[in-house]
Amino acid sequence: MDDALAERVLAPAFLGAWSRAVIEEFRRPNHCSSCHGFGERLQLIGLGGNRARAEVVSCEQCIGQGVVPWSKKRRARQLSIGEHPYRNFLNPHHEGALALLRELEHRGAVLLLRHLGTDGST
Ligand SMILES: [Zn+2]
């Protein structure tokens, strides 16, 4: 990272903008166009002849997540920064922060279900 970019990235205003960009993607994810955000889809399995059965399978396009990442271009635009420096230096941190938010959301949901006694553990 060149000095000018490092100086800009380390400024508190930029870090705040970066945090808001990560939260914005968390709040408004790109739902997978293949499974419409469900992470699963129905697949017809041929049984021979003209018989088939439907089976729920994990979506291959989003690896069962139901969402696909924003493009790096869109992420860079959120920060008013070039796509190349974003891709090389900031994207891994964006991915990590976004994964952390999703993990926290999941843990919160598990705790809530456990508290309500609807997680099957009671
Ligand atoms: Zn999908």
Image (cartoon, rainbow, N blue to C red):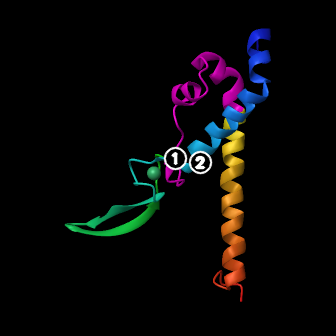
- The vertical placement of 26 against 106, above or below, is above
Gap in angstroms between the C-alphas marked 1 and 2: 6 Å
Q: For residue 95, what is the image quadrant?
A: top right
Image point (80%, 24%), residue name: 10
Say which element carries label 1: loop
- Residue 82 location in percent, x, y? 59, 17
Residue furthest left as drawn? 50
> Is 75 one of the magenta-colored residues?
yes
Residue 69: say if magenta.
yes
Q: Secondary structure at mark 2?
A: helix
Q: Which residue is mark 1?
A: 29
Disc 1 residue type? Pro
Residue at mark 2: 26
Can you tell which quarter of the image residue 103 is in?
bottom right
Quarter holding the N terminus is top right
What amino acid type is highlighted by mark number 2? Phe
Residue at disc 2, CB closer than 8 Å to ligand 1:
no
